Image (spheres, grey):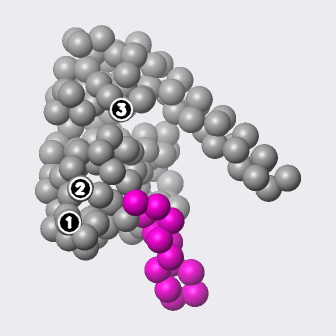
Amino acid sequence: MKHLLENVHIFSKLSDEELDLVIGICRPETKEPGAQIVLQNTTGKDMFIVDEGSIEVYVEVDGVDKTIVFLGHGQLFGEMTLLDQGHRSASGRAGKGGCSLVRMDNDDFKALCEDNPKIGYSVMKHFAMDMAFKLRHMNLTSA
C-alpha cells in the first residue's frame, strides 16, 4: 500500500513516517464488476484511491446514467469528503473488471491531522492546488 500512496499527489510530499501514519487509517477493499461504491446526492464519509482496475464515475441525468470518467491506478474519488461531509456530486461503481481500492474515513483522517498538523497542512495544500487548477481550467473552457 505504501507504494500506491507515495505516488498519489496529495501524499507525495509526506515523509516515510508520515506516510506510515496515513497507511494506518486506510482500509483495502475489493469490488466485483459493477459494484456500487458511492451514490450521488448521499452524504460522503469516505475517500477512495484506486489501486487496481477502475472506477466508473457517473451522474444521473433525466433518469439516465451518464459516465463522466473512468479512474484508474493512483487516482482519487470522493476526496471532497475530507474537506466536508456534503452530498456526493457523482456516483461511482467498479469498472468492468472490478477493482481494488483503498478507503479512508473522514473521521480517521481528521483525527490523524489533529495529532499530526504537518500531514494535514501538506494534504490540504495539495487539495487547494488541485481546486485552483480545476477552477482555472473550468473558467478557461467556459470563456
The residue that disc 1 covers is 97
> Of residues 72 and 120, which is closer to you in this image?
72
Location of residue 112 by image quarter: top left
Marks 2/1 in contact by CB < 8 Å: the verdict is yes
Disc 2 is placed on an element classified as: strand
Place of residue 14 in the rendered image (x, y in percent of width and height, measured from the top left): 34, 16
Q: Is residue 75 magenta?
A: no
Mark 3, other Cα within 10 Å: few <14 / some 14–19 / many ≥20: some
| Residue 87 horizontal/vertical position (percent) | 49, 60
Location of residue 24 by image quarter: top left
Tell me which numbered mark, 3 or 1, is placed earlier along the sequence: 3
Label 2: which residue? 53
In this view, 94 is above or below 127:
below
Tag 1: residue type?
A: Gly
Task: Point out the tag, 3 or 2, that comes first from the N-terminus.
Answer: 3
Label total for image: 3
* Residue found 48% across the figure and 46% down from its top: 80
Residue 22 rendering spot, x and y as whole percentages: 25, 26
Q: Nearer the viewer, mark 3 or mark 2?
A: 2
* Residue contact at pointers 3 and 1, CB within 8 angstroms: no
Which class describes the residues within 10 Å of circle 2: few (<14), some (14-19), or many (20+)? many
Mark drawn on residue 82: none
The magenta span reads 57-70
Q: Residues within 10 Å of mark 1 (few under 14, many from 20)?
A: some
**Residue corresponding to mark 3:** 8
Which of the 4 quarters of the picture holds residue 26? Answer: top left
